[in-house]
Amino acid sequence: MTNNRELNIVVEEAKNYLCFLAETGCTGFECLKKSLDTIDKWGKKEVLLKETLETIRIDLGDCRRCKLSNSRKNIVFGAGSPSARLVFVGEGPGFEEDKTGKPFVGAAGKLLTKIIQAIKLTREQVYICNIIKCRPPGNRNPELDEIKACFPFLERQIVALKPDFICTLGLFATQTLLETKEPISKLRGHFRDYKGIKLLPTYHPAYLLRNPDKKRDVWEDMKKLMNEMGE
Ligand code: URA
């Protein structure tokens, strides 16, 4: 079913039929008030539009929406708590992530784990995902058509997660979510709004591995994040 209007019609008809059966005293199935209230809610827009990470993953399927699907080993959907207050968004899977299907498990991932621990959280308490879900060959930068194909799934994941905070890691995640071309050096450390969610850009852990002197800046950003989160 692709069209919400069609779905609404089917739900409305099913609802009417079930109410009709209930009114005629049907005892073939349970018609408690609680059940009828649940059926009544089926027709409401916000219930119809509610997605979970599982349904989004099912919709993604064995994705062939962009050319990265030709070379990837595994789709890296995301990992962590579905009720996370904080979501980290990186760029895209690297070699280890492609091999395992899990985000941030390579060298940059180990540093991200330390950053998460430094703000007194665990990987299991946050949610970790990327702008694109398949590894670009040779870890090249994601291309525009790849981001365009993949980003709607991240948008839906964020809606399903409803986090209070997003921390974007590096240029691609930050520029994509904020729809800006400003450099990461200007954006980092300043809270911005993403659809009512507080978004804090910081440097990517892979950049920190190459530029360890920038760890100090990231620590400053993480202190701001902890403070804002009340952690
Ligand atoms: N770099 C990213 O941006 N994401 C990963 O999952 C791993 C490395």
Image (cartoon, grey):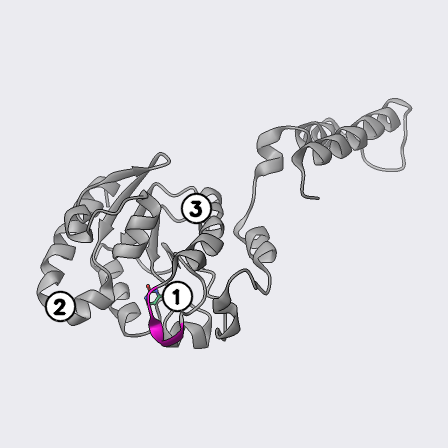
Please identify the quarter of the rendering in which residue 100 is found: bottom left
- Separation (CA) of disc 3 from disc 2: 30 Å
Q: CA distance from mark 3 to mark 1?
A: 16 Å
The part of the image, by quadrant, that contains residue 40 is top right
Residue found at x 43% / y 73%? 98
Q: Identify the mark nearer the N-term, 1 or 2.
A: 1
> Tag 1, which secondary structure?
loop
Amino acid found under the numbered disc labelled 1: Pro
Q: Which residue is mark 1?
A: 103
- Residue 158 circle label: 3
Judge whether residue 24 can be spotted in this image: yes
Seen from the viewer's position, the closer of residues 196 and 22 is 196
Based on the picture, tell me whether residue 74 belongs to the magenta stretch: no
Quarter of the image where ligand 1 sits? bottom left
Q: Earlier in the sequence, mark 3 or mark 2?
A: 3
Gap in angstroms between the C-alphas marked 1 and 2: 22 Å
Q: Which residues are magenta?
A: 137-141
Q: Main secondary structure of the magenta part?
A: helix
Coordinates of residue 58 in the picture (x, y in percent): 60, 57
Place of residue 7 in the rendered image (x, y in percent of width and height, measured from the top left):
71, 36
Considering only vertical position in the picture, is 150 above or below 95? Answer: above
Ligand 1 neighbours mark 1 (CB distance < 8 Å): yes
Residue occupied by mark 2: 211
Which numbered mark, 1 or 2, is in the foreground of this view?
2
Left or right of 45 on screen, residue 86: left
